[in-house]
Amino acid sequence: MADRRTFLGIGAAAVLALATGCTGGASEEEPADFSGEITGAITVLTNRTDLATTALPAYAEKFQQKYPGTTVTFEPVTNYEGDVTTQLSSGEYGDVLLIPNTVKVDQLGQFFEPLGSLDELKAKYRFADEKAFGGQVYGLSLGGVANGFVVNKRVWQQAGITAPPKTPEEFLAGLTAIKAKTGAIPFYTNYKDGWPLSFFNSQRAILGDPAANETFPADPSPWQPGKIQHITDGLLFDIVRNKLSEPDPLTTNWEGSKPMIGTGKVASMLLGSWAVPQMKDAAKAAGANPDDIVFWPFPYQTAGTFHARIEGDYKGAVSKTSENKATAKAWLEWFVGESGFAADQQAIPTPIGQELPAVLKDFQNTGVELMELPAAVANTGKEDEIIKVSEIDLAGNIYRQKLIDIARGAAKGDKESYFAELNKRWGEAQSQVMK
């Protein structure tokens, strides 16, 4: 994958109000009609502009060999979230597409055909509940990722650390040793680009609670000591406060950070497993050893075990306005289940039972338990509402950039005062939303 924004859509955009005249919810939809012969032409919208004229046509050729008489054409979209959201409003959005993050779950049935019941599809596919509503599934993930730290193990070894730290304190001690014993930047925040900071919100599995998404909106103070936000955001604060990150966060550069960690100028970044192949490629291009790049779990154990969240990537869906839904669904199911795309991207395959990629096998060898956290059911949509009312962009970067500014002395306050402010704002919004 080229970068996070061209493969991964998790939490990448705020939920927007779509300008449509439709108001019906997914649960009001009639069952989809996918009957008819699998033949004819379909158009597939893709964010993978880098693959639209290379790898994707090669996949299409294989599909067309399996289903003679079909033709698959790709429409690459550079500004996928913004442009496709506009296309949804116009009604012209191809036969198969990735569900933009701007579409709320209760809007899925306005734009996409239900692919089957959640009960049926969750037995076959991972991440089936991530784009489900009213008991129906509207999108299949093109692959999945795990969350943790991309590290240059050679640099960590030079500092005397050969295994993933088990606690935030051990992690900070490791970064301190890297600063003292090597010339590397111990941790790179990617502050300026911003979006990498959202991965501090992707560590919810570290407490080992499979109901974390259900219970999170019910908590009025998640920045209290011992709770998930205090653990994760607290680590970020302490890294910056102890001057273990880049000297000037205002000048960070995502693309530039790849060869920096690839060659050992940076020791660690918090990202998804999707980033590992990119950093390995950057290392190879710079003449360094790609085997130095490995993936470690977040430094926190519950009952003596690391836990890491796995979650789906963008979800492919069949357009409500498609005039060739039989072929559209056949393509989507083939691409997810048979094309090999996920394996080619070193992603977690969506069909249950398919083999994990090498990157994730090595990750599991650290002793981490991979956890898929089911979406909230009783509290569905509540977290988004609290985020909106509190104006704390939990899945974004704005409040974490302020946290970094406070930690580096560029803004007033300290960790305790800022976490108290966040608890107050969250708690007030939570009391309104959950009443």
Image (tube, rainbow, N blue to C red):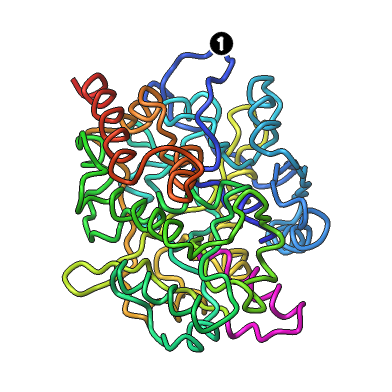
Residue lying at the far top of the rendered structure: 21
Amino acid type, callout 1? Gly
Q: Determine whether, in the image, residue 396 is placed left or right of residue 389.
A: right
Q: Is residue 281 magenta?
A: yes
Magenta segment boundaries in residue numbering? 273-292
Note whether residue 364 is visible. yes
- For mark 1, does the 10 Å Cα neighbourhood hold few (<14), some (14 to 19), or many (20 or more) residues? few
Residue at horizontal 55 percent and vertical 42 percent from the top: 12
Quadrant placement of the N terminus = bottom right
> Is residue 92 or residue 254 the one in the foreground?
254
Residue at horizontal 73 percent and vertical 42 percent from the top: 42
Q: Looking at the rendering, which quadrant does residue 381 occupy?
A: top left
Percent x, y of residue 398: 50, 38
Q: Looking at the rendering, which quadrant does residue 82 occupy?
A: top right
Q: Determine whether, in the image, residue 154 is placed left or right of residue 207.
A: right
Which residue lies under the disc numbered 1?
Answer: 21
Q: Is residue 278 magenta?
A: yes
Note whether residue 125 is visible. no
Percent x, y of residue 60: 74, 57
Q: Is residue 196 above or below residue 166?
A: above
Residue at horizontal 55 percent and vertical 37 percent from the top: 13
Magenta stretch, overall SS: helix
Residue at horizontal 75 percent and vertical 49 percent from the top: 72
Quadrant placement of the C terminus = top left
Q: Determine whether, in the image, residue 343 is placed left or right of residue 133.
A: right
Percent x, y of residue 169: 30, 69
Which SS class for mark 1?
Answer: loop
